[in-house]
Amino acid sequence: NPKIKHSNTDVLIIGAGPSGLMAATWLARAGVPFRIIDKRSNEIFSGQADGLQCRSLEVLKSFSGSTFDMTALDSAWKMGNHMIEMCFWSPDENGQLVRSGRIPDTIPGISRFQQVVIHQGYIEKWFEESIKHFSGNEVHVERPYLPLNISIDETAAEDQDAYAVEVLVKDLSKDNLSQPEQFSAKVANGLYRQFEGDQEKFYANLSADLENDPNANTEDYEVIHCKYVLGSDGAHSWVRKQLGIDMDGETTDFVWGVLDMVPITDFPDIRNRCGIHSKDSGSVMVIPRENDLVRFYIQLKEVDRDPATKTDKAEYTGNVNDKKASTKGRIDRSKITPELILKNAQEIMKPFKLEMTDLHWFTGYQIGQRVSPRFDKLSRVFISGDACHTHSPKAGQGMNVSMMDTFNLGFKLALVCKGLAKLDILKTYESERLGVARDLIAFDHKLSRMFSGKPMIPNSKTLEEGVDMDEFHKAFLKGNEFASGTIVDYADSILVDKSNTEEPDSDGRAFSYFASKVPVGRRLQTNLILAQADGRPYHIVDRLLSDGRFRVLIFPGDVKAHPENLETLNKFDAYLQAKDHFSKKYTPVNALDNSVIDVITIHATNRHDVEIFDFPEFTRPVDFKGRRDYWRLYSGVGPTYHEGDVDAYEAYGIDKKKGAIIIVRPDGYVSKVTEYNLGGLDEVGNYFERFMIPQEGKVLPKRSIDVDDTDR
Ligand code: FAD
């Protein structure tokens, strides 16, 4: 229809849940033109996810830093309920509920943050604020907008600068459909949804109007021409369906209810996370939350099911549209009420009393585990988050893994859109995240079955088939490591080079020869380092903020005890100043030297025994006005005035005589470790050569090169 408006943008994000918002934050931070649309007229106010895992907190922190506290992303740490202990309750020999174990909720030492619990709505709100902040108020979530049609010009897919994808969207603000109730008696099953009616018909009517009716109202429609499209549109993803991708997986017969409320109870562990297995009545998980709220996940024993969906097939067929996935049939959600869920909880928690006040939210769900076999089409249209993987919510993974999907994709899209890196890096999105999604499904499969199964009664001969509680505790402890998000390990690829590593250990970690405690492919664990200039201790990762830059960390060792190491560092200076070497070669002419690849030096000499001017110019460069950058030179060892002794060399397994060089990706994962000499520096150059595009005098728009280096 010629009357319809057309527009261009680099990236169109469809869906403003945690996954889409994380991608938007990256793109806003990196200064890439993008839009983000959502079919809902407003954000979520209650329900859904509430657990923020260690890695997610590390990532939220990496977008802030001292001068960006106004974005409030790390408010989660201040406002959320901190999860310290997990307690297990199960029947004793007489079938009486007793506390059978206690473990730390987060494995000690795994991260500087521990899991916190806070409502998903806050997290989405902080993301929206940060997007506005980073984009200079230019981008906000456009709602309610619905995509109607998507097409890829396959002939242009290889052309990095082409607007190869077209999406027809409709502004729904005049349609009542986009404003459903979120929580009231009318919302029968507690779920905040769109289009309870026939979606296919709705879509067909919209398109028919536009094509056939000469008087159709075209002003609400727009064709957006994009370089890339990201479908972060949830479990029933429209984008995934347009790409013709079916989910693989299964649905089980276990049914669970969720209550968010303030309980009145004499159960002593109500402010701890608890796994409670009753003898015959099922299980409960207790999650204490902010503002004295508690979330209960409650196994429901007797639930009405839709007889039409009953089947003899025990296993899911692999087709997402197959409604006959469960042996007993699908649950009738409309029959699940808060009172019914509470009644089940009261049975399970007997003899403890449990009453409900201040009900915030409830829902019921049938456990299923599904994963998409593909995450993109032609590296032009991507899907992320629940659109790629769905599973039970009790391990607090959905929102976290969904955000991590786009934390992985966002910087890659930014580098490609800016013309700094080749299209090829986009292929690593699927290769890196599909593995994580499959691990997640396997993890959830195991844990949810152990949690939903009947417990084995100690010393009982009658229930030998039950779940062994010791095994369950062990599985939970091991599961916490996975759930923390800190052990994600990306395989060898164009962005990860594991060539200088030992054979992987039993946990799959490929430690480097030159930094024996640094597994290549995993996120760089933080350690304290001291600014050479003023002695202030910094967490190293707070110097590696998420602003789109690669980091080359040079560890020259102890330059006082081994003066030859300082000579090597002086030789690096000439190398790094040369136009054809990585630090200049990939940097646009109008950008700061360190705005694409930031080089940071961390020596192993007590900072009182050396001066900043003992070190070569690249470690303390000056800008065009002569202002010195003091924040690229650190000591990794020595006493601090207030935080004890630090030794980053010991923590990373770097020899103080030999040194090392570590490359860190913009998302904080270790790309490569090599030796500290000119050969090692050449290897660094070779690494970037694989995917970076030489800039040769190119100029980029100011917004996209402004890394705001004051943000420490
Ligand atoms: P969503 O959050 O589903 O966001 C998708 C967005 O896309 C929505 O805003 C939707 O309106 C929009 N959208 C959908 N279709 C279209 C379309 N066609 N056009 C435009 N916009 C569209 N996860 C955890 O990590 N921890 C937990 O503790 C946890 N607990 C949970 C408890 C419950 C009861 C439930 C239901 C979920 C829980 N989850 C948990 C899972 C978590 O909520 C999801 O995994 C997470 O929200 C997924 O994020 P997403 O951005 O991929 O998708």
Image (cartoon, grey):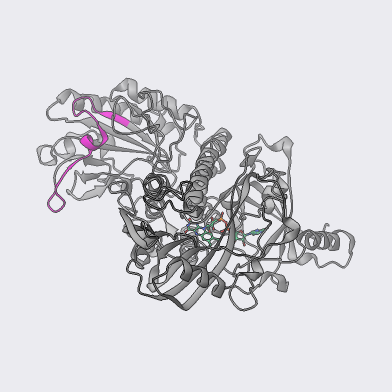
Instruction: Write down the region rendered in magenta.
Output: 640-661
Q: Quadrant of ligand 1?
A: bottom right
The answer to which of 265 and 534 lies nearer the viewer is: 265
Quadrant where the N terminus is found in the figure = bottom right
Q: Quick check: is 68 in the magenta stretch?
A: no
Q: How many marks?
A: 0
Q: In terms of image quadrants, where is residue 115?
A: bottom left
Q: Is residue 90 left or right of residue 260?
A: left
Look at the image and tell me whether residue 28 can be seen: no
Question: What residue is drawn where x is 43% and y is 48%?
Answer: 461
Q: Is residue 553 above or below residue 393?
A: above
Q: Nearer the viewer, residue 321 or 297?
A: 297
Question: 668 or 131, which lies in front?
Answer: 668
**Can residue 529 be seen here?**
yes
Whether residue 13 sits left or right of residue 346 in the image: it is right
Establish if 707 lies above or below 140: above
- As drawn, which residue projects farthest toward the left? 609
- Indicate the quadrant where residue 315 lies: top right
Percent position (x, y) of residue 559?
16, 30
Q: Is residue 139 above or below residue 469?
A: below
Q: Position of residue 203 (x, y in %)?
A: 78, 60
Residue 583 position in % (x across, y down): 39, 33
Which residue sits at x=73%, y=41%?
Answer: 153
Query: Farthest residue toward the top?
Result: 679
The percent coordinates of residue 447 (x first, y second) are 47, 48
Q: Which residue is more in the foreground, 276 or 697?
A: 276
Quarter-wise, where is residue 52 in the image? bottom left
